[in-house]
Image (cartoon, grey):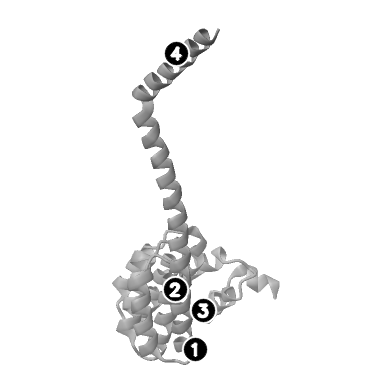
C-alpha cells in the first residue's frame, strides 16, 4: 500500500516537474510583469501626487505675485512652473493668469508668449480655447488683424462660439468692416446664453451701431 502511495506521489511530482519545465518561465515572467506593473502603478500615482503638491505650491506663489501686480516675479515663477510641471493643470491655469498681469503692466510681448504656450501645449481644450481668445484680443490691440483671425479660427469648441464671433466682430470693426462686424456680433449674441451678463456687452455693441437685437428690442 505504501509503495502504491509512493508511486502516486512520484507520478504527481514528475507531472508537476514536467508542467513547470514547460510553463515555468512563462508563469514566472507573467507574475513578475504583474508585480512590476502594480509597483509601477503605485509609483506613478505617488509621483503624480508629488508633482501636484509641488506644482500647487508654485502656483500659489505665482498667484500671490499676480495679486500684488508683480508681473516680473509672476513671469519668473510661471517659467519655472511650466518647465518643471508643464503637464499639470496648475501650469496651464498659471499661463492664463500671468498673461493678464503681464498685459496689465504693459508687457504685451511677454503676455503673448505666455498665452501662446497655453494655446499650443495645454492638454485641456478649454484652456487652449481661452488662450486663443485672449491672444486674439492682444493681437487686435497690436493691429495684427490677420494674427487675431488665425487665433479665432483655432478655437474649435462650440461652447466658445459666442465669444469667438463677438471677438471676430471686434476685429472686423477695427478694419472698418461694419456690416461684417454686425453679422459676427449678431451670431455671437445668438450663441450666448441669456443668463450670461456678457451678452449685454455684445448687445451694447450692436445697439451702438443701430443694430439692436430684435428679441431685446421687443422685450423693452
Q: CA distance from mark 4 to mark 3?
A: 92 Å
Q: CA distance from mark 1 to mark 3?
A: 31 Å
Number of on-image labels: 4
The residue that mark 3 highlights is 205
Which label sits in the foreground, 2 or 1?
Answer: 2
Which label sits in the foreground, 2 or 3?
Answer: 2
Crowding around mark 4 (Cα neighbors within 10 Å: few <14, some 14 to 19, many 20+) is few
Residue 122 position within the rendered picture, expressed as x and y whole percent measured from the top left = 39, 65
Q: CA distance from mark 2 to mark 3?
A: 44 Å
Q: Quadrant of the C terminus?
A: bottom right
The residue that mark 2 highlights is 54
Give 145 or 28, whichever is nearer the viewer. 28
- State which tag comes first along the sequence, 4 or 3: 4
- State which tag comes first along the sequence, 2 or 3: 2
Which residue does the image show at 55% across and 68% down from the upper left?
A: 189
| Residue 26, label in figure | none
Give 193 or 1, whichever is nearer the viewer. 1
Relative to 207, residue 187 above or below: above
Q: Quadrant of the N terminus?
A: top right
Amino acid at each position: 500500500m505504501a509503495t502504491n502511495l509512493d508511486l502516486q506521489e512520484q507520478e504527481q511530482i514528475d507531472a508537476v516537474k514536467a508542467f513547470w519545465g514547460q510553463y515555468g518561465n512563462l508563469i514566472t515572467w507573467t507574475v513578475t510583469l504583474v508585480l512590476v506593473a502594480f509597483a509601477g502603478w503605485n509609483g506613478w500615482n505617488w509621483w503624480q501626487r508629488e508633482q501636484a503638491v509641488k506644482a500647487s505650491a508654485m502656483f500659489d506663489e505665482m498667484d500671490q505675485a499676480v495679486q500684488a501686480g508683480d508681473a516680473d516675479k509672476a513671469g519668473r515663477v510661471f517659467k519655472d512652473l511650466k518647465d518643471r510641471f508643464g503637464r499639470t493643470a496648475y501650469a496651464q491655469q498659471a499661463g492664463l493668469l500671468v498673461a493678464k498681469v503681464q498685459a496689465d503692466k504693459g508687457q504685451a510681448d511677454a503676455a503673448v508668449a505666455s498665452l501662446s504656450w497655453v494655446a499650443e501645449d495645454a492638454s485641456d481644450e478649454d484652456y487652449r480655447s481661452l488662450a486663443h481668445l485672449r491672444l486674439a484680443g492682444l493681437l487686435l490691440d497690436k493691429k495684427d488683424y490677420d494674427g487675431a483671425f488665425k487665433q479665432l479660427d483655432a478655437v474649435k469648441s462650440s461652447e466658445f462660439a459666442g465669444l469667438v464671433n463677438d471677438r471676430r466682430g471686434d476685429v472686423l470693426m477695427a478694419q472698418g468692416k461694419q456690416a461684417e462686424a454686425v453679422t459676427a456680433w449678431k451670431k455671437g449674441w445668438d450663441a450666448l446664453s441669456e443668463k450670461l451678463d456678457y451678452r449685454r456687452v455684445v448687445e451694447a455693441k450692436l445697439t451702438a451701431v443701430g443694430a439692436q437685437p430684435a428679441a431685446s428690442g421687443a422685450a423693452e
